[in-house]
Amino acid sequence: MANQHHLKLLKKSPRTWNIWRARHPEVQPNFSGADLQEANLSGAHLYGANLFRVNLSGAHLCGANLCGANLGGALVTDADLRQTNLCTVSFYGVNLQRANLSGADLYGASLWGADLRGALLKDPKPDQPRHRRHRLKGMR
C-alpha cells in the first residue's frame, strides 16, 4: 500500500517531491497500488521507488529517473517516458501499450513479460556509447 505522505508530496509537484527526496535519500518511496493516471511526473526522482501495480496510464514522466524502481504489474499505457532513466528496471508484467519510450535509457532493463504493443522505442540519444544503447533483456 502506498505511503500517503509520499503520494501527497509527489502529487503536489515533481519539484516539491525532488526537494523532499534530496533531503531524505535514505527513504525508499512506496507508491504501490497508487493511482497516478495522467499525473505530471516529468523530471521526478523516483529511483528505487516501489511502484508495484501503480496506474501510470497517460502519465507524463519525461526526464524522470526511475532507475532501479519496482514497476512489477504496473499499468503504463499511453505514458510519456521520453528521455526517462529506466536502467535496471524489470518490466515483468508491465503493460506498456502505446507508451512513448523514445530516448529512454533502458541499460540493463528487463523487458521479459512486458506488453509493448504499439509502444514507441526509438533509438536513444546518438551521443550515448553504443554499448549503453543495446543492453536489453527480453528483446530480440
Image: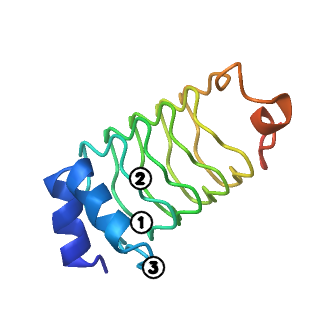
Q: Comparing marks 1 and 3, which lies closer to the viewer?
A: 3
Mark 2 element type: loop
Residue 90 x, y percent position in the rendering:
64, 59
**Residue 24 falls in which quadrant of the image?**
bottom left
Give the alpha-carbon distance from disc 1 to disc 2, as whole Å.
Answer: 7 Å
Residue 34 seen in the figure: no
Q: Identify which residue is drawn at 26% across, 54% down.
A: 36
Q: Which is nearer the N-term, disc 3 or disc 2?
A: 3
Inspect the image, locate mark 3, and give the three-letter code of the amino acid beneath it: Glu
Q: Which mark is residue 75?
A: 2
Q: Which mark is residue 26?
A: 3
Query: For the residue carrying disc 1, how many other residues have a C-alpha within 10 Å: few (<14), some (14-19), or many (20+)?
Result: many
Inspect the image, locate mark 2, and give the three-letter code of the amino acid beneath it: Leu
Residue 65 x, y percent position in the rendering:
48, 50
Q: Which mark is residue 53?
A: 1
Circles 1 and 2 in contact, beta carbons < 8 Å: yes
**Residue 27 falls in which quadrant of the image?**
bottom left
Give the alpha-carbon distance from disc 3 to disc 2, as whole Å.
Answer: 27 Å
Q: Which is nearer the N-term, disc 1 or disc 3?
A: 3
Residue 112 x, y percent position in the rendering:
71, 54
Residue 95 seen in the figure: yes
**Residue 140 falls in which quadrant of the image?**
top right
Inspect the image, locate mark 1, and give the three-letter code of the amino acid beneath it: Arg
Q: Which is nearer the N-term, disc 1 or disc 2?
A: 1
Circles 1 and 3 in contact, beta carbons < 8 Å: no
| Observer-nearest of 108 and 100 | 108
In the rendered view, tell whether residue 46 sits above or below residue 57.
below
Q: Which mark is residue 128?
A: none
